[in-house]
Amino acid sequence: MPRIAIIGLGLIGGSLGLALKRANVADLEITGYDSEPGVGGRARKAGAIDNDARNIRAACEDAALIVIATPILSVRPVLDEIAPVLGEGAVVTDTASTKREVMRWAEETLPEFVSFVGGHPMAGSERSGVDAADAALFQGRPWAVVPSVRAAEGAVQTVVGMARLAGANPSFIDAAEHDAYAAAVSHLPLVVSTALFSLASSSPSWPDIAALAGSGFRDVTRLASGSPDLALGISRTNKDNLLHWIDRFGEELRRYRNLVENGQQEEALLETFAKAQLDRDTFLLAPPRPPEPAPPSEVSSPGEQFRTFLVGEYVSRRLKQLETMTQARPAEDDELRRKLEGGD
Amino acid sequence: MPRIAIIGLGLIGGSLGLALKRANVADLEITGYDSEPGVGGRARKAGAIDNDARNIRAACEDAALIVIATPILSVRPVLDEIAPVLGEGAVVTDTASTKREVMRWAEETLPEFVSFVGGHPMAGSERSGVDAADAALFQGRPWAVVPSVRAAEGAVQTVVGMARLAGANPSFIDAAEHDAYAAAVSHLPLVVSTALFSLASSSPSWPDIAALAGSGFRDVTRLASGSPDLALGISRTNKDNLLHWIDRFGEELRRYRNLVENGQQEEALLETFAKAQLDRDTFLLAPPRPPEPAPPSEVSSPGEQFRTFLVGEYVSRRLKQLETMTQARPAEDDELRRKLEGGD
């Protein structure tokens, strides 16, 4: 039976497990591992995984698909740890917020007979940990898929199928493009949201200010409740893009400041806010979606597609192992023949 | 029967009507008026008001409580318009986002026998208009109450009671303090949220960027979907405070930029994000709430309290009118007596 391993059972790993279990794919077995004691057991009780592995290598041995859902700075150590136990044809993916470094780490650590396909689900919550896991977390959300150069086509389809099964909208993107765009739409908002909260909350009048905080303040500062590790991971692995967008945002903020300050520019101020309102309403009504990877025509449901590829990868790995054994035999035969024939 | 008039039947006015009708106060009649044709009828059909007044003055004549829920820059013209028809003891309140100018306008326009009590419910939605009205919009949200110097105690209690009936948490605040704090927690977030959206959406790569936008981007940019009139109104009536907070935010952003840029400061970066996370979690778990105005002890439910004050105001107005008539009589009597007595 093909097996999936999820390494890291926080909000993302736990929600992925729940979503995949809910998709009810026949014979799908999910093994989970989390470095924090007790988390694996809670994930199993919550129904996010079938088995709670005793260690990270045990989780990955013989797994057809390995999902690394740890904080970004743990991805490299996890790759180092699991590389020696991965089977031929195994597919490895991740869920980290930046992709260039992750692709480089995978290239440096994984054996050639393993396919790495980077991934980034654009979903989150202000809550974290497996207890906040939600089967619907990825529903309708983008899931960036970044195939490595040498990933097998079947491996890419496996990861696309998994994202689709979880309810997300998968699309292919290049690692450099991903990091540039994610900086604008995810990493800059994280910095801005957190800075907005820390500015207000560091005021001596904070108790009085907070008493006036309504739903708008809560929404705009939501990302300040995210994990500090995420901020550090992004800052280390996507610094150039993040600095670029912080600087551009500083300029945009000065433009707004001038509109507010200059009473002669009321028309320009109205136009600026009206344009943002219109553009955002357009964005909400018809969010731009890149063309989705076409599903193969011969299988019907997303669950079947995913299983077909998962099974396909598993079968092709076994075939390769058999082939290796077959290729080994003639040599043994030669040796045997020589012995039997009594050679030199 | 005491009557409430709601002027402006958008998201706030409409939601207030729905919330008050849902509170089921006996004999409460709500008349509404909106300058946009058709809106009054839609509000009546939605159950937000009982009567759709043919004009603004007809709505306010003989009303015990008038709520001005128009865009902020319309508050002054509305006050000018209704001042001549307000009855003795009428209570006037508003829902505008800034309070210093509104209090000045009320002082300049309203007759002395009317009580003005400023109000600001800290609630909103990215949708607007009466069709987005929601009886639960104010549930658990702060509602700032700013009594004018000469407002009668009963008038203040009427507005507090109305906010409470709508489900909000009313609290008293000074107009200058309100505007300073609201700039930090409401007006700066509006500018930041809008600037963040307009920056991303003005990029030539916007379609690709938008395809990666998840729930975080949506939440943080939500205020960009607000009314441009609100931005202009705030900019005109709270410019000093808004500029102050934009500048402070610019400094805070530079602090974050330095943390991201300088790889030697990883500990400081982690500390900064961890502190924001902790402070925000604390804020969410136990939002600071100023002491609520104590409800009078002799009445039981908020609905009864509100009605008592509303009726009280109505009765006291009638009493004053009677008193005026009574006071007038002696003069007439004197005149009559002099005539009868045949004086000088």
Image (tube, coloured by chain):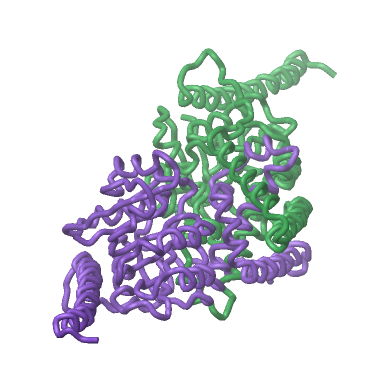
Chain colours: A purple, B green
Residue at 71 percent of width and 43 percent of height: A202
Q: Is residue A48 above or below residue A65?
A: above
In the image, is B63 to the left or to the right of A133?
A: right
Residue at 39 percent of width and 54 percent of height: A7
Considering the image in quadrants, where does the C terminus of chain B appear? top right
Q: Is residue A48 above or below residue A295?
A: above
In the image, is B203 to the left or to the right of A146?
A: right
In the image, is A57 to the left or to the right of B219?
A: left
Instruction: Using the rendered image of the protein, determine whether residue B45 is visible from the camera's viewpoint.
Output: no
Q: Position of residue B245 (x, y in %)?
A: 74, 52
Residue toward you, A308 or A321: A321
How many numbered marks does the figure carry?
A: 0
Residue at 34 percent of width and 40 percent of height: A41
In the image, is B129 to the left or to the right of B109?
A: left
Task: State which quadrant residue B60 falls in.
Answer: top right
Q: Position of residue A178 (x, y in %)?
A: 50, 73
Q: Position of residue B167 (x, y in %)?
A: 48, 34
Residue toward you, A325 or A169: A325
Residue toward you, B98 or B115: B98
Residue at 16 percent of width and 78 percent of height: A298
Q: Is residue B235 above or below residue A49?
A: below
Q: Determine the residue located farthest toward the left in the rendered image.
A: A340
Instruction: Using the rendered image of the protein, determine whether residue A119 is visible from the camera's viewpoint.
Output: yes
Q: Is residue A175 above or below residue B181?
A: below
Q: Position of residue B99 (x, y in %)?
A: 70, 44
